[in-house]
Image (cartoon, coloured by chain):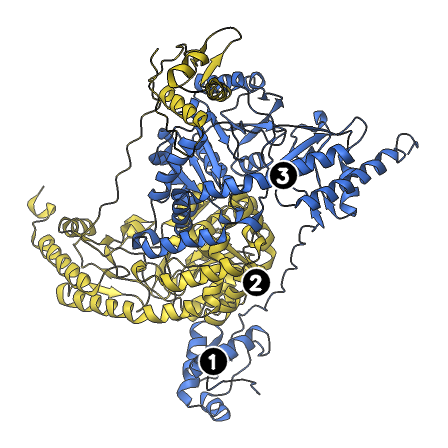
Chain colours: A blue, B yellow
Amino acid sequence: MELLVTLDRDAPDPLHRQLERELRDAVCEGRLASGAALPSTRALASQLGLSRGVVVEAYEQLVAEGYLTSLPGGATRISTRIAARPPVATSRSEATRHRIDLGYGRPDVTEFPRQSWLRSLRRVLNEAPSDRLSYLDMRGAPELRETLTSYLNRVRGTVTHPEHVVICNGFAQGLGLVSQLLQGRGKGTIAIEDPGQPEPALVARVHGLTTVPVPIDDEGIVVEALRRTNADMVVVTPAHQFPTGAVLSPGRRAELVAWAADGDRLILEDDYDREPIGAVHGLAPDHVIYAGSASKTLAPGLRLGWLAVPGRLVDELAAIKESTDRGSASLEQLAFADFLERGEFDHHLRRMRPIYRARRDTLLAALRRHLPELEPVGASAGLHVIAWLPAGIDEQPLVQGAARAGVGIYGLRPYHSVQATARPGLLFGYGTATETEIEEGIRVVGEAFDAVRSAPTAAATGR
Amino acid sequence: MELLVTLDRDAPDPLHRQLERELRDAVCEGRLASGAALPSTRALASQLGLSRGVVVEAYEQLVAEGYLTSLPGGATRISTRIAARPPVATSRSEATRHRIDLGYGRPDVTEFPRQSWLRSLRRVLNEAPSDRLSYLDMRGAPELRETLTSYLNRVRGTVTHPEHVVICNGFAQGLGLVSQLLQGRGKGTIAIEDPGQPEPALVARVHGLTTVPVPIDDEGIVVEALRRTNADMVVVTPAHQFPTGAVLSPGRRAELVAWAADGDRLILEDDYDREPIGAVHGLAPDHVIYAGSASKTLAPGLRLGWLAVPGRLVDELAAIKESTDRGSASLEQLAFADFLERGEFDHHLRRMRPIYRARRDTLLAALRRHLPELEPVGASAGLHVIAWLPAGIDEQPLVQGAARAGVGIYGLRPYHSVQATARPGLLFGYGTATETEIEEGIRVVGEAFDAVRSAPTAAATGR
């Protein structure tokens, strides 16, 4: 048997480790056939110019690991038990990259305040006590819960306490934790906004809960319709309904809170954007789970989110967080606490506000110019605008037409639970596109719109 | 009505925001009674020396948020819908702090390489492309999957590929992801080692799976007993069985792999410690999910873990990771990739090895000196040692006696699934205690042991 083995006498790794690795690779790659006998340690040592001890050590290690078998008095053989190296699964296709993407949901990460975030990380690594690098309280680092509480109470109008805050890895995880909590209490139905975000329905289903859609109008969620459901919890976006942009009216806020209080129900308030209107949480902190995250304000890659929960639920949620992943990463939490504490977060938001406002203004102006028949709706805030389509024009051909010209826009259908009543519309995100890209993108959408309108419809041509 | 409002004309916040916050706090704290009428905007403006517009703006905001109600032609009133601020739930009791803790499972975080980790973070923040701060491929950052794959294949003897690696937030989350995968396939039984870690049973139960214990002997898990179960997956610690320290023998490795291959079953290999013996993964990469983490080698606070999975499962696991928390934090992943790439991880492990070895030697010497009747067992590796107790001595009085003297040690009962056959023993961790603490701690345990042995037993005194 010929063994092709490459050893590097100058490498930092000891020779027996190198030999071991070479042999293991040869076995795994099928170069050494299953069941074949290896040269004796003496023969291989002489062939490679090694001391016999080196070969013995490598063989012994591979016998212990199951690659080789060795019977007393017999040859050392390649184990017959080794499976062939499996083929590499083909990588999933990447999401289509558009030349210009007017998709929703991502802030402009090119503006992430890298240097001030690094300063916060440096302070944390230089100053944090060592125990902060071990497992933390499952609710999260006390420093962050403290700072975040005073920030949210001051800026978002919540009424919470550091003991009632649970740090999580963004909204999706928060939703999962709350779903598990409901599941554990045998409460099974979550009301969701229609149209609304698709995540709550997906996550609820994973945890064996059912969802019931509740319609949205200009004042936000229709609480009268919510009352007719058997929901134990509702997921709402009161400050800026997603995707319609409706602001929950004062009357509806009162009705919503009454709905929760009347039946010991919960409101999960997704404060996904930073809007000028305060949180519902402050009106009924014992019935509202307030959820926020840094994904739309700083960067999704941080995976930083938080829940401010009624005191009676906090221990249970912390226990669920523990069984889920034993708490969130500590350096990121401490860095964010420092970043908030020093006003860097406010500074970043203030810096971004005129940038996003200019993009929104550009978008609205471009819509007026290139798509005058569309009706933009919703509050002038956030990172997106929606517009209803005129009668007879559907989303899909428009989205496809724009995509063929390299521009990503998105229809509203995927956000509707009840497709039959879904009014066709488009969603334009301006978080990541420049003003030039927005102007150009909308011009392209305008051309797609004209093409769709002038095309003979299937009905007209009798097809 | 007297309104006590404090405004700071020099503060950066505009006056209407300050007034709004003061009023909101007064409502939430019950200082302004539910239903009470507020002064007119004109009256309050004159009382506070503000322009009327400031008061109008603050009232309007609070009406929008639901704190105040305002009917045309009527007074602005405090909403009757506001719940009283709920009491703060009392904080859960902290885990008892021992003077000396010989608990298991934590590395010495005081030795965390803060400066080299900071250097990696700095490089990442200075050099990483912006899209790395947005949502990543749900399997994790490609840089880390690449570096980790070559590291694991080289050092741990796995045979994996970057496409087959899924980054997660530590072992507990990895276990949760895999449990969800089994649940989704309608496969419901997980075999666990007995004695073994308690986490797999807890996490499996959360996901509606059942567990079946399989005994351990000197060669690790008894595969013959595993064959008699109906398990779809087994969770094993082959390199260094937890807690017994047994190393899975070559014969058992082959049997285990055959068990999995015979019935399309899975092996979840928890490579929790960094041990000299290679992973089972390399023998059957199509049947083994290899799990590792930085919790025992660097710091639990990083929440960095990884799964190397059979190619046919990777898309499904990535989708489960997405619905769980939309991926792990990116900066930490990129920093770890840099840290690995530059050899800092190996450097840290090499630096820690003699430190832990000296602690283990001190522990074993102290056991011989102060507790000669105990039998330490298991491989000389990892961060803990276990010892069986002589007949007639139970764990609980010893653990309690040591705790009264300020020393934390732990019994093995909590790690047994089948209590009837559980042999009493103690687990000594040396990850976080200094050599002086270990010597002193074992001396105290020795005293507790003598006290327990000389105490009249319940049986002897007839009680």
| Badge 2 and badge 1 in a common chain | no
Label 3 is found on which chain of the structure? A
Q: Which residue is mark 1?
A: A18
- Is A381 above or below relative to A55? above
Mark toward the viewer: 3 or 1: 3
Q: Nearer the viewer, residue A324 or B398?
A: A324
Quarter of the image for residue A42 reads bottom left
Say which element carries label 1. Answer: helix
Give residue A247's quadrant in the image: top right
Give the image location of residue B94, x and y in percent.
Answer: 26, 42
Amino acid type at mark 2: Pro
Q: CA distance from mark 3 to mark 1?
A: 60 Å
Please tell me which residue lies in front, A269 or A33: A269
Q: Is residue A414 left or right of residue B456?
A: right
Tell me, yes or no, if residue B135 can be seen here.
no
Whether B293 is drawn above or below A264: the answer is: below
Specify the quadrant that holds the N terminus of chain A: bottom right
Which residue matches tag 3?
Answer: A358
Question: Left of A287 or right of it: where is B318?
Answer: right
Mark 1: amino acid: Gln
User: Do tag 2 and tag 3 residues touch (Cβ < 8 Å)?
Assistant: no
The amino acid on which the numbered mark 3 sits, given as a three-letter code, is: Ala
Q: Nearer the viewer, residue A452 or B392?
A: A452
- Per the image, the residue denoted by label 2 is B162
Q: Give the residue drawn at x 42%, y 68%.
A: B344
